[in-house]
């Protein structure tokens, strides 16, 4: 029972640690996603600014992997080059080292304040940014609480007779410790979480420095492996960035490992206690990596281009994914409706992929990506037809009134998604091509306004797909209320655009028609997805003729 209790406490603490890091990242992305993207775009002409942007992004998102995925998507669309993106990733790894520095301090006294303030902001305020700031504060509070729980959970290890032998072996076999650190970081999908776990063990005098240092080096390599794994199906440029970062970090890790094994390093200068020595060693490693590797960014970019060449054929890109429609369950209406819902979800996910890079395509021409998006639209059109025919066949069965109503709702959703695909491909993509053909450019302020609208619609698309599956009332309420928020953002962008026209802004005058058409396109896409909430609200009796009822059931 003691072993089970220990494992349960340790697992709970680790899960809370991982969840809290994700919670902070989600809050920052939702509150300041467009600002972060603009920050990375604004650093394209300076390698030093790339590094600084990476540091700032990782500190805010609590994750170098999140920054890596973000800039990799920019590289895939041509907004950023491989070399600039790689410099951002090097900075992001340094940023996570600063995060570890902060979180390794004794901040338990902050936990009640963070949870209280964050809870008030998240639960009592309706403004999206305010709620997300609350989410971030709660996440940091949970993170500190998880570290406290880890410290308490490791107590029973002190009395375990086998644990000193294990860590003693790791201290002697630094290669095994290095590999173990990489595996732990990969399993956690977070080098920050892995290194914080090591610091907790070090604070409890359970992990000697001889074992802790190679574990930290391994965790750095494991963190870069996570990015390689997550981008394995992304654009070739994105894969090149993550592989190049892995080469940098693996090479640096091996060199530092050799230094630990064959020389005596002045580790006493890194701090007075094991925890400070571990986190300062982690920081020193990442600083050294930036200084040493930055001059080699361009040569390594050329190397990975040779290692990961352009594919000779791309026939699979346009292959139609297997349909989720199951004609074998047509005699069971509930199963058939569930099958249609799964196919709708797949359509929605395809739409999300098509819509995500829109603002990047306005910045830089990407004919190949535009071709791929239009190929996806053909899949959307085919799925739309298949769903309508599938549900039409189902309607020939003897259905209950509720099942008939649900079938009609799903048909309308399919029609809406097909329309969204047309807006993206026939309207918005054509506008990106017109922009580049005529060498036009949005004004800086206008570009930020459109990016804000786009990010807002992206968030609502994700919520709508969740609502489609969960049919949760509160989520549907939240989604429906976003229509008014989008209307407010649209009106503000329209008014400011007219002010710029009146002020004679050259870029605004040249792109005026395109600017207004983009706003209308994003607004309609947003409205189509918000409509996913209305059937749920109607079933619960909270949908009024002009707005969502304020009275909760």
Image (cartoon, rainbow, N blue to C red):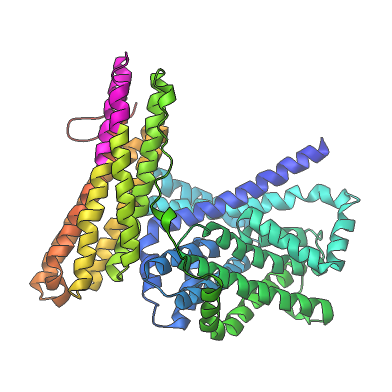
The residue at the point 11 percent across, 65 percent down is 498
Specify whether residue 553 is painted magenta: no
Residue 357 falls in image quadrant:
bottom left
Magenta stretch secondary structure, dominant: helix
What's drawn in magenta, residue-wise?
A: 388-416
For the point 70% across and 51% down, which residue is it? 150
Q: Residue at x 88, y 49 (%)?
A: 159
Relative placement, left or right, of 221 versus 358 is right
Location of residue 354 in the rendering, given as x and y in whole percent from the top left corner: 33, 54
Q: Is residue 193 visible?
A: yes
Residue 397: % across, % down: 32, 16
Q: Position of residue 425 (x, y in %)?
A: 25, 54
Q: Nearer the viewer, residue 68 or 396?
A: 396
Quarter of the image for residue 384 reads top left
| Residue drawn at 39 percent across, 39 percent down | 345
161 or 169, which lies in front? 169
- Where is the N terminus found, in terms of image quarters? top right
The answer to whether residue 230 is above or below residue 408 is below
């Amino acid at each position: 029972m003691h072993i089970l209790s220990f494992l349960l406490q340790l697992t709970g603490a680790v899960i809370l640690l991982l969840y809290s890091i994700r919670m902070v990242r989600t809050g920052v992305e939702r509150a300041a996603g467009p600002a972060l993207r603009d920050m990375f775009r604004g650093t394209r002409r300076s390698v030093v600014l790339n590094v600084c942007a990476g540091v700032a992004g990782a500190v805010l998102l609590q994750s170098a992997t999140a920054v890596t995925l973000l800039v990799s998507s920019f590289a895939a669309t041509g907004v950023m080059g491989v070399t600039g993106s790689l410099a951002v990733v090097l900075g992001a790894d340094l940023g996570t080292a600063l995060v570890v520095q902060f979180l390794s301090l004794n901040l338990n006294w902050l936990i009640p304040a963070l949870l209280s303030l964050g809870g008030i902001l998240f639960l009592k305020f309706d403004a999206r940014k305010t709620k997300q700031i609350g989410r971030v504060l709660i996440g940091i509070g949970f993170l500190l609480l998880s570290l406290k729980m880890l410290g308490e959970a490791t107590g029973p290890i002190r009395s375990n007779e086998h644990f000193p032998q294990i860590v003693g072996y790791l201290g002697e076999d630094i290669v095994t410790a290095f590999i173990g650190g990489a595996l732990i970081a990969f399993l956690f999908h977070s080098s920050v979480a892995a290194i914080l776990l090591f610091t907790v063990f070090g604070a409890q005098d359970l992990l000697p420095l001889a074992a802790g240092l190679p574990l930290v080096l391994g965790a750095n390599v494991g963190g870069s492996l996570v990015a390689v794994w997550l981008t394995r199906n992304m654009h070739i440029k994105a894969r090149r960035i993550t592989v190049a970062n892995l080469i940098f970090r693996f090479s640096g890790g091996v060199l530092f490992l050799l230094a630990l094994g064959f020389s005596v390093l002045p580790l006493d200068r890194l701090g007075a206690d094991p925890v400070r020595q571990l986190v300062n060693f982690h920081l020193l490693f990442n600083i050294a990596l930036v200084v040493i590797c930055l001059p080699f960014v361009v040569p390594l970019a050329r190397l990975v281009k040779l290692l990961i060449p352009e594919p000779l054929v791309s026939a699979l890109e346009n292959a139609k994914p297997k349909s989720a429609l199951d004609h074998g369950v047509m005699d069971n209406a509930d199963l058939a409706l569930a099958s249609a819902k799964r196919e709708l979800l797949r359509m929605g996910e395809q739409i999300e992929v098509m819509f995500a890079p829109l603002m990047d395509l306005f910045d830089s021409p990407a004919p190949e990506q535009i071709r791929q998006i239009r190929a996806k639209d053909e899949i959307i059109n085919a799925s739309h037809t298949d769903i309508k025919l599938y549900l039409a066949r189902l309607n020939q069965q003897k259905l209950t009134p509720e099942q008939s109503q649900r079938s009609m709702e799903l048909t309308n959703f399919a029609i809406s998604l097909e329309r969204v695909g047309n807006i993206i491909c026939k309207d918005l993509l054509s506008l990106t091509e017109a922009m580049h053909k005529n060498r036009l450019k949005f004004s800086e302020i206008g570009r930020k306004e459109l990016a804000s609208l786009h990010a807002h619609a992206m968030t609502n698309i994700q919520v709508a797909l969740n609502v489609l599956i969960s049919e949760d009332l509160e989520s549907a309420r939240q989604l429906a209320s976003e229509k008014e928020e989008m209307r407010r953002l649209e009106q503000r962008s329209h008014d400011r655009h007219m002010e710029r026209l009146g002020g004679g802004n050259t870029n605004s005058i040249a792109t005026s028609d395109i600017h207004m058409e983009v706003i209308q396109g994003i607004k309609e896409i947003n409205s189509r997805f918000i409509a996913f909430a209305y059937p749920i609200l109607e079933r619960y009796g909270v949908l009024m003729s002009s707005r969502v009822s304020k009275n909760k059931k």
